Image (cartoon, helix red, strand yellow):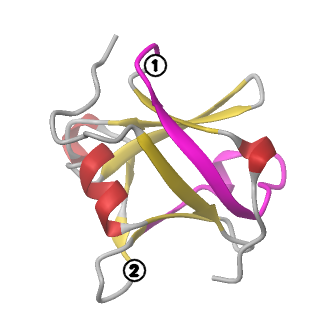
Amino acid sequence: MTAVPEQVTDCRASVLLSRDGYLRLSRQDAARFFPEDTLLVIWRHGVLYLLPTRGAAAGGLLLKQRNAVGDRSVLISEAFAFDIPEGRFPARWDDTVGGLRVSLSQGESADE
């Protein structure tokens, strides 16, 4: 079991899944939950999990800076054999998996 990264004080976040298959995180959420800018994306039993890794050498997907503010994005659509829902979704740190658990059933449409 992995604990919340030290710098995390609020265990909640928000992720945006775009029409073109990208997962987007704010600069702040990316820094809190994925300080190495790398993660694994796992779809299990209808839930999306985002698990931090310990740098690029550990494998996983690389979060790329997408704007001058420092927000991050990663293309995840190629990893799944179905259409990813579009919108903004709540996420919460889950100690049992050591990563963010994204609730895809509670999304809001987004215009980003």
Q: Splitting the image into 4 quarters, where does residue 46 fall? A: top right
> Is residue 77 on the magenta stretch?
yes
SS type, badge 2: loop
Which residue occupies the foreground of this view, 74 or 29?
Answer: 29
- Please state the horizontal and vertical placement of residue 109, each as a whole percent of the image: 78, 69
- Residue 34 showing in the rendered view: no
Q: Residue at x 32, y 67 (%)?
A: 27
Quadrant where the C terminus sits is bottom right
Which residue occupies the foreground of this view, 101 or 90?
Answer: 90
Q: Is residue 85 above or below residue 58?
A: below
In this picture, residue 38 sits left or right of residue 110: left
Which residue occupies the foreground of this view, 9 or 65?
Answer: 9
* Type of amino acid under label 2: Arg
Task: Look at mark 1 in the image and give the residue it sits on.
Answer: 97
Task: Look at mark 2 in the image and give the residue it sits on.
Answer: 66
Q: Splitting the image into 4 quarters, where does residue 60 fall? A: top left
